[in-house]
Image: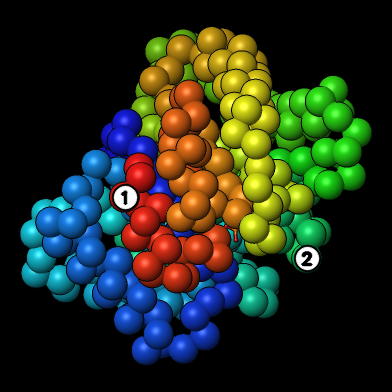
Amino acid sequence: MYNDRPTIIANWKMNPTNYADVIDLFNLYCQEFNSNRIDPKFNLIVAPPTMYLFPLFKFLTSQNLNQKLNSIFLSGQNFCCEPKGAFTGDTSIEMLQDLGIKFSILGHSECRKYYKETDEIIAIKMLLALQSNIIPIVCIGETQEQFVQGDKVIKAFLKQQLLVVIKKIENLLNNIPSAANAKNKINKFAKCFFIAYEPVWAIGNGANVDVNYIQQNIDYIQHVISSYLINKIDSDLKYYILYGGSVNHNNAKELFKIRNLGGVLVGGASLKFEQFKEICANA
Ligand code: PGA
């Protein structure tokens, strides 16, 4: 169900705030994809507010448009780390699955900040996602405070965020008796995961982040995932690294040149269709 094309994720956060605008915006996305103007040489993943997932899922499946729309997917913005029960205001992973949702963002810096999500909680959710065949999009990134302390602190922090998640996957695999079983087990997993590198200080403010800086950190993230996870497990689990943080129509071209970048995660600019279109055109 997934492929190696670049991925563009539109994180609408808590926008738009009415149904008509949600449908209008999504319709524009679909029409543009369906026209000849955009060749879907990339995957588009749209993460609307939870309550609009179902109407958009229905909208997408009811569109009698050509197969280019097969490259549009829907994603949750988060889900609960418990399967069901007394968790007022939350959404369970089973609910996402039930609606045919195949992706979920996890560990977004806004959830870490406002809802006090920890690396440990995010790792539990990631594992749940993989086991439920939902592809997790896990956000990591240094804060302003870490950024000003320089490269060593930034890398140590990225590694720490990654290792909590990696350890959980490793533990699960190690608890399975034989290698053959491990392979079997992981075959039931979602076949891949995303890590979205989002420097927190660059989110939502139009920051002009140096692409060399991003490249360095993408390389480092790749190094950590390969050496601590992928090279250690006997599985075809794949991963893609994305960049997010003030992605816009002015910087998209340069960002897509970054080596080994699997795509971008777009917040604010995904709500401004004309700008978003330009970002997509650069994929
Ligand atoms: P931004 O948001 O593109 O508005 O900076 C990105 C994000 O929060 O994921």
Q: Nearer the viewer, mark 2 or mark 1?
A: 1
Q: Secondary structure at mark 2?
A: helix
Q: Is residue 254 left or right of residue 29?
A: right
Q: Residues within 10 Å of mark 1 (few under 14, many from 20)?
A: some
- Which quadrant holds the C terminus? top left
Provide residue 105's location: percent of width, then percent of height: 54, 53
Tell me, yes or no, if residue 9 can be seen here.
yes
Label 2 – label 1 distance at C-alpha? 34 Å
Q: Reply above or below: 77 against 186.
A: below
Q: Reply above or below: 45 against 235.
A: below
Provide residue 236's location: percent of width, then percent of height: 39, 20
Q: What type is the residue that disc 1 sits on?
A: Ala
Residue ID at (84%, 23%): 152
Provide residue 143's location: percent of width, then percent of height: 81, 46
Q: Is residue 33 left or right of residue 45?
A: left
The residue that label 1 is drawn on is 281
Quadrant where ligand 1 appears: bottom right
The residue that label 2 is drawn on is 114
- Which quadrant holds the N terminus? top left
Depth check, front residue: 268 or 108: 268
Q: Secondary structure at mark 1?
A: helix
